Amino acid sequence: MPKYIAFLRAINVGGHAVTMDHLRKLFESMGFSNVETFIASGNVLFDAESKSAAALEQQIETKLKDALGYAVAAFIRTGAELKEIANYKPFPQARLHAAAAFNIAFFKEPPDEKSKQRVMALRTGIDDFHLRGRELYWLCRKKQSESTFSNAVLEKTLGKPSTIRDAATIQKIAVKRWDRARISPRG
């Protein structure tokens, strides 16, 4: 049975509070198995018979809206995709080690050329970006509080939803679920 990770937007932010036990039970009620949450920011690991990420995203979004009363965007990746994302090195090692933060944003579909140009125009002395497929790698050279970039800025720039996770979280999920070998985005 295929293994997936759902990165959910709007879980335990903006005044919404969802326990991970409740979230796990909601996923189980959709017929998913081996459901496990990872930290309280909306990361759900599960097995499903479906081989369509788009169908799973729609199913999860519909169920969560009905159960929670507000829209929750879901971004699905397979175990193999997550391992590849965790192993990908978008910036030279020296820059990764010097960075204050290294994050990964998830999209449902790859941005088109115009959208890529708009995102890359957001580069500053603090923030650098690398787009690859359905992910944006964000290198923040100083504290994120000093940056003008955020998920809200990214969504406004693209006109589409996204969600951001720390690269270390992605590494931990990849190791936890699919690969017991050490995967380190920062080397």
Image: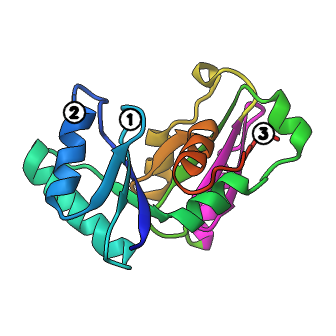
Residue sitting nearer the eye, 40 or 103: 40
Give amino acid for label 3: Arg
Image: magenta residue range: 113-139
Query: Does residue 138 show up magenta in the picture?
Result: yes
Nearer the observer, 37 or 145: 37
Residue at numbered disc 2: 18
Quadrant assignment, res 37? top left
Circle 1 residues within 10 Å: few <14, some 14–19, many ≥20: some
Residue at point 78%, 32% (across, down): 125
Q: Could you tell me residue 35's position as x and y percent? A: 31, 52
The relative height of residue 111 versus residue 101 in the rendered view (above or below) is below
The three-letter amino acid code for the residue at tag 1 is: Ser
Inspect this view and state whether residue 180 appears. yes
What's the distance in space between the residues labelled 1 and 3, CA to CA? Answer: 22 Å
Dividing the image into 4 quarters, which one contains the N terminus? bottom left
Going from N to C along the chain, the mark reached first, 1 or 3, is: 1
**Disc 2 versus disc 3: distance between alpha carbons?**
31 Å
The stretch drawn in magenta includes residue 136: yes
Q: Quadrant of the C terminus?
A: top right
Identify the secondary structure beneath mark 3: loop
Q: Residue at x 32, y 69 (%)?
A: 48
Nearer to the camera, 178 or 155: 178
Question: Which mark is first along the chain, 3 or 2?
Answer: 2
In this figure, which residue is indicated by the disc labeled 3? 186
Q: Which residue is mark 1?
A: 41
Question: In the image, 25: left or right of 87?
Answer: left
